[in-house]
Image (spheres, rainbow, N blue to C red):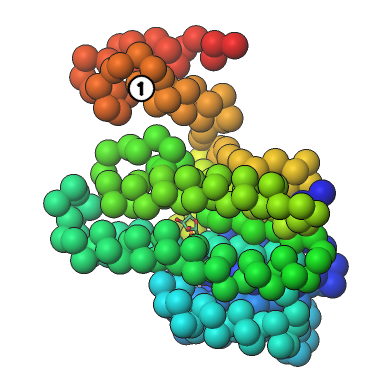
């Protein structure tokens, strides 16, 4: 069974200073795990580490200022964690950049595309490359959770670079999960966390959104039944709505419709009608 939070385990969480990552770190601390948080935001990281140390004692908390895009930094972190706590039982590759400067369009400066891919995609690859060999050789159960996005599944207009990076996270995580399950006696599993609309960062909580703690509670429940996809609803989007949107998107290929037909004027009525019906069995 893939247990996200287990007493005496070791949690390593990137982007652990804020939002969903911080909620995971708090849950891990409350469970009695040793907790490692890594983040670029020095001030928030220090504040979160202090808070975790109140629950766990400073000896059981490690905080590292780093950029997940750096192979060297992630490799060094894995070495330090191994020495101090042993291999992680939970690796949460959660840090991501959203918009780095541009208008978010298809002609966003290439530097912005490179940065989003370096963080959102290769940051996850770096985490897996650095920690997975240690998790495998530890010979005990472990879970890797990569944070994706619904934007990586359905690609709504507005931020093609982010959408594309999160689509890559989806593909990468599925490849990782399949690879792990084919390994003889492997006790490490992989999971894709797909948050809904969640109040994070410095945003004010709005009606309809979930709190990061709800996302983490949902994640723990889904992982307890060994599922790969952790597709979170929120108070505005129930699971059936997500399922229909994902189904419509996949059917674009099968029905030879235009790309992202959900947002094509000619398909507006058909999509609206589809959303009113039950999902085909
Ligand atoms: N909030 C939502 O509605 C939502 C929806 C879908 C997916 N997500 C995903 O959830 C994850 C967590 O984001 P959040 O919403 O909690 O945002 P957040 O801003 O509260 O937290 C993200 C943290 O990641 C850190 N970070 C960013 N780039 C980094 C880097 N290169 N190296 C190290 N740390 C870095 C930030 O400093 C921040 O502390 C992200 O992968 C995001 O794409 C969020």
Few, some or many residues within 10 Å of mark 1 (<14, 14–19, 20+):
few
Q: Where is residue 188 in the image (x, y as percent from the top left)?
A: 72, 57
Please, what secondary structure does the residue beneath circle 1 have?
A: helix
- Is residue 272 shown above or below 52? above
Q: In this view, does 65 lie to the left or right of 166?
A: right
Q: In this view, does 99 lie to the left or right of 123?
A: left
Q: Position of residue 130 (x, y in %)?
A: 57, 73
What residue appears at the point 51 percent right and 35 percent down from the top-left corner? Answer: 236
Q: Where is residue 185 in the image (x, y as percent from the top left)?
A: 80, 54
Label 1 beta carbon less than 8 Å to ligand 1: no
- Is residue 204 shown above or below 236? below
Q: Is residue 224 left or right of residue 152?
A: right
Q: Residue furthest front?
A: 184
Marker count (numbered): 1
Viewer-side residue, 222 vs 233: 222
- Is residue 244 shown above or below 129? above
What residue appears at the point 37 percent right and 52 percent down from the top-left corner? Answer: 165
- Is residue 30 shown above or below 249? below
Q: To which residue does mark 1 refer?
A: 253
Q: Position of residue 209 (x, y in %)?
A: 51, 45
């Amino acid at each position: 069974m893939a247990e996200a939070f287990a007493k005496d385990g070791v949690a390593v969480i990137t982007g652990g200073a804020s939002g969903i990552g911080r909620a995971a770190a708090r849950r891990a601390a409350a469970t009695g795990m040793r907790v490692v948080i890594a983040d670029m935001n020095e001030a928030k990281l220090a504040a979160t580490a202090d808070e975790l140390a109140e629950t766990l004692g400073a000896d059981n908390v490690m905080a590292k200022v780093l950029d997940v895009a750096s192979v060297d930094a992630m490799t060094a972190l894995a070495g330090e964690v191994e020495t101090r706590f042993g291999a992680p039982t939970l690796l949460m590759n959660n840090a991501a950049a959203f918009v780095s400067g541009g208008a978010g369009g298809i002609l966003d400066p290439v530097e912005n595309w490179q940065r989003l891919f370096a963080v959102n995609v290769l940051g996850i690859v770096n985490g897996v490359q650095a920690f997975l060999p240690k998790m495998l050789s530890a010979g005990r159960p472990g879970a890797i959770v990569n944070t994706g996005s619904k934007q990586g599944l359905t690609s709504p207009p507005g931020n093609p670079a982010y959408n594309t990076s999160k689509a890559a996270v989806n593909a990468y995580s599925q490849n990782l999960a399949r690879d792990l399950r084919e390994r003889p006696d492997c006790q490490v599993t992989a999971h894709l966390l797909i948050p809904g609309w969640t109040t994070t960062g410095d945003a004010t909580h709005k009606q309809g959104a979930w709190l990061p703690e709800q996302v983490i509670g949902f994640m723990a429940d889904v992982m307890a039944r060994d599922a790969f996809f952790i597709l979170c609803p929120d108070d505005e989007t129930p699971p059936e709505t997500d399922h229909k949107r994902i189904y419509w998107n996949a059917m674009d290929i099968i029905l030879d419709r235009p790309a992202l037909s959900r947002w094509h004027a000619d398909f507006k009525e058909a999509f609206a009608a589809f959303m009113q019906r039950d999902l085909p069995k």
